[in-house]
């Protein structure tokens, strides 16, 4: 009887400890520690790379050989900034690709809200 009591006194705390250590966390909960700094966004630090990656290179829609609007330069992006913003917010761009994440959209939106400066 004494051996059973000792075994139970060891098994119960270990079982509780193991049970409590196994939790399910969603992808969002695991990645929520990643912060998004969408303040102080500049064309040179963020927007140019965003446009190059998602509009010029990846999709090929707005690059050098594109049959549509070019977004290769600051002036090209600036001239079409409202249309570009509307399209990325609604998920219309990038074409044939998933909608951009909220952080990326927030960066573009804040840049536009700050007057879309060339900096």
Image (tube, helix red, strand yellow):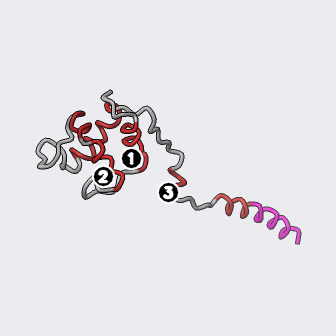
Task: First in sequence, mark 1 or 2: give its number.
Answer: 2
Q: Is residue 89 left or right of residue 51?
A: right
Q: Is residue 68 magenta?
A: no
Q: Nearer the viewer, residue 97 or 23?
A: 97
* Distance Cα–Cα, label 1 vs label 2: 10 Å
Q: Is residue 1 left or right of residue 44?
A: right
Crowding near the residue tagged with mark 3, few <14, some 14–19, many ≥20 C-alpha atoms within 10 Å? few
Picture coordinates of residue 5, whole percent (x, y)? 85, 68
Q: Nearer the viewer, residue 33 or 15?
A: 33
Residue that carries the numbered disc 2 in the rendered image: 87
Task: First in sequence, mark 3 or 1: give its number.
Answer: 3
Residue occupying the far right of the picture: 2
Q: Quadrant of the C terminus?
A: top left
* Distance Cα–Cα, label 2 vs label 3: 27 Å
Q: Answer above or below: position of 20 versus 110.
A: below
The residue tagged with tag 1: helix, strand or loop? helix
In terms of secondary structure, what is the magenta stretch mainly? helix
Residue that carries the numbered disc 1 in the rendered image: 105
* Residue drawn at point x = 39 percent, y = 43 percent: 109
Crowding near the residue tagged with mark 1, few <14, some 14–19, many ≥20 C-alpha atoms within 10 Å? some
Q: Are marks 2 and 3 in contact (CB under 8 Å)?
A: no
Looking at the rendering, the stretch of residues picked out in magenta corresponds to: 1-13
Quarter where residue 56 is shown: top left
Task: First in sequence, mark 2 or 3: give its number.
Answer: 3
The residue tagged with tag 2: helix, strand or loop? helix
Q: Quadrant of the N terminus?
A: bottom right
Residue that carries the numbered disc 3 in the rendered image: 27
Residue occupying the far bottom of the picture: 1
Quarter where residue 96 is shown: bottom left
Nearer the camera: disc 2 or disc 3: 2
């Amino acid at each position: 009887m004494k051996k059973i009591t000792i075994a139970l006194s060891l098994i119960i705390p270990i079982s509780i400890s193991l049970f409590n250590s196994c939790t399910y966390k969603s992808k969002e909960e695991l990645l929520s520690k990643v912060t998004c700094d969408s303040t102080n966004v500049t064309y040179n630090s963020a927007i140019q790379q965003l446009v190059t990656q998602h509009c010029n290179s990846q999709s090929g829609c707005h690059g050098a050989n594109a049959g549509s609007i070019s977004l290769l330069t600051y002036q090209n992006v600036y001239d079409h900034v409202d249309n570009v913003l509307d399209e990325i917010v609604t998920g219309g761009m990038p074409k044939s690709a998933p909608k951009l994440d909220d952080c990326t959209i927030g960066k573009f939106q804040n840049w536009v809200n700050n007057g879309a400066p060339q900096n």
